[in-house]
Structures are given as C-alpha cells and as structure tokens.
Amino acid sequence: MRKPFIAGNWKMNMTHMEAAIFMQDFHYDMKNKNGCEICICPPFTALRGIKNIIDSDKIDVAIGAQNMHWEKSGAFTGEISPEMLEALKVDYVIIGHSERRQYFAETNETVNKKVRAAFAHNLKPVMCIGEDIDIRQSGKAEEFVLSQLAACLDGLEEKSVTGLTVAYEPIWAIGTGKTATSKDAEDMCAAIRKKISSIYGPDIAEAVRIQYGGSVKPSNITELMNMPDIDGALVGGASIKVDDFLAIINY
Ligand code: 13P
C-alpha cells in the first residue's frame, strides 16, 4: 500500500520569519495527519529555520527544497547544490516544476541530471511533468506527458525509481483555479503508472507514488484522493494558508 503524500510547494512566498510563524501555527493546529506523509517545501532561505523548528518541536513533517543544481559544487553563481541540501538533512526536492521549465529553461535533460543527483545525495525527488493547454486541446496530452516521463527517467536504476514521487501537474490547472477533473487526473496518473511498469516492471510501478497538482483545494481533494492511482497532492497556493493546508491533509 502506498502512503498518501501531501506536499506544499510554497513557491516564492514567505520570508524566513513568516515561515517560522506558519510552522508554529501549523503545528499547534495539526491534530492528526490522517495517515498521510506531509512535506513542506519553502524557499531556500527558510529551509534551515523550518528544519530547526521541526527538529526541536519533534514535528512529524518532512521538508523539501523546490529546486537544486545537479553538480556537487563549483562556479554556478546563485545555485544550490545537492550536497548543501543533504547537509541540511532535507528529505525531498522538487525537480522540473513547470515554472522552472517555463521561466528558467529547464529541460527533460536537466531534470534527468537533477533526479540522478538527488538520489546520489539521499534526497527523494518529486519529479514534475505535465502538459500545457495547447497540448491538452490537441488531444496529445498523454503522449506528451509519457514522453516527458521516459526522458526524465532515462538511465535511472530500478532501485532508485522505487523512491521516486512523480507529480502530474497540468500547466493549465496551476494557479488558475481550474482543476483537472478527477477522471482526467486519474486517467493520466494511471497512464504514468502503466508506463513505469513497462520500463521497470509492475512491482516498482506499484511502489512509486504519483501526486496530482494544479489548484488543489479543500473542496476538491477528497474526490482526487479517491482515485486509485492518485497517491497525493502537490499543493501550491492553498499550502501557504494553515487552515486550507490542514483541511487538505484531513480530506
Ligand atoms: P496551485 O495549487 O497554486 O495551482 O499550484 C500547483 C503547483 O504548481 C504545485 O507545485
């Protein structure tokens, strides 16, 4: 059985001080986790502060970064390395978010390098894939997403893939309030699992967690989580509001 996995991607929101206040409110109000694994992905500047609060207050929540470089160190001004995240004892790292692909020229090739680097540094990648509105309307969404998946997984070993989370995030649903229908989201997540099975076999496909992301909110999470191939959510806007994020966890 795959444990439901709800992650909050804060994107470029919250100072380290606001993040500390969020964590205290969140912890105070979090009565139970509804059997979910929870992960918070703040900006880099808040990682250390949040990690300290999690450790000192023994909060059972994982922490993730939103991006990283694939090299261990070097002349890459402005970048953060996997080694730095590993040293901070970060659990997860989001790789290849559509905003990174759209605004920062990330490609399937860089995503592949980053996913490999994450595994090499004991970080669990949450690898994002998803189509834009033109591809969806052309009827080629599945073909596109599965080719992204194959390219991003290129050459990855079986034993790594078991620890992978795939986030299916249709770009047209991100920050738009327009969620994919639970059927469309399930159809794509099932296709992703089938493709993983065709590459790595059914046991690994059964172990990999697949999240849906794109305008997830308290009002639509239950329907999404009732789908057999949707194992969790990657939540943007609603994850920076304590009440909404807790309501999503307690779907
Ligand atoms: P929203 O939940 O704000 O649509 O963002 C989704 C997302 O991009 C999570 O990574």
Image (cartoon, grey):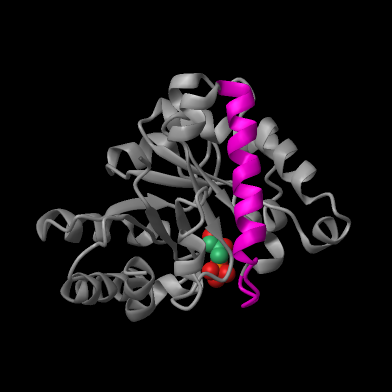
Q: Residue 17 appears at what percent x and percent y? A: 29, 73
Classify the position of the C terminus by image quarter: bottom left
Q: Could you tell me which residue is drawn at 66 percent across and 49 percent down?
A: 188
Q: Is residue 27 above or below residue 201?
A: below
Query: What count of labels does the image hold?
Result: 0
Q: Is residue 147 above or below residue 171?
A: above
> Which region is colored magenta?
175-200
**Main secondary structure of the magenta stretch:** helix
Q: Is residue 46 magenta?
A: no
Taking the image in four quarters, ligand 1 sits in the one at bottom right
Residue 162 occupies quadrant: top left
Q: Residue 69 appears at what percent x and percent y? A: 53, 39
Q: Could you tell me which residue is drawn at 63 percent across and 60 percent down?
A: 183
Position of 61 compared to 156: left or right? left
Q: Tell me if residue 99 can be seen.
A: no
Q: Residue 65 appears at what percent x and percent y? A: 42, 51
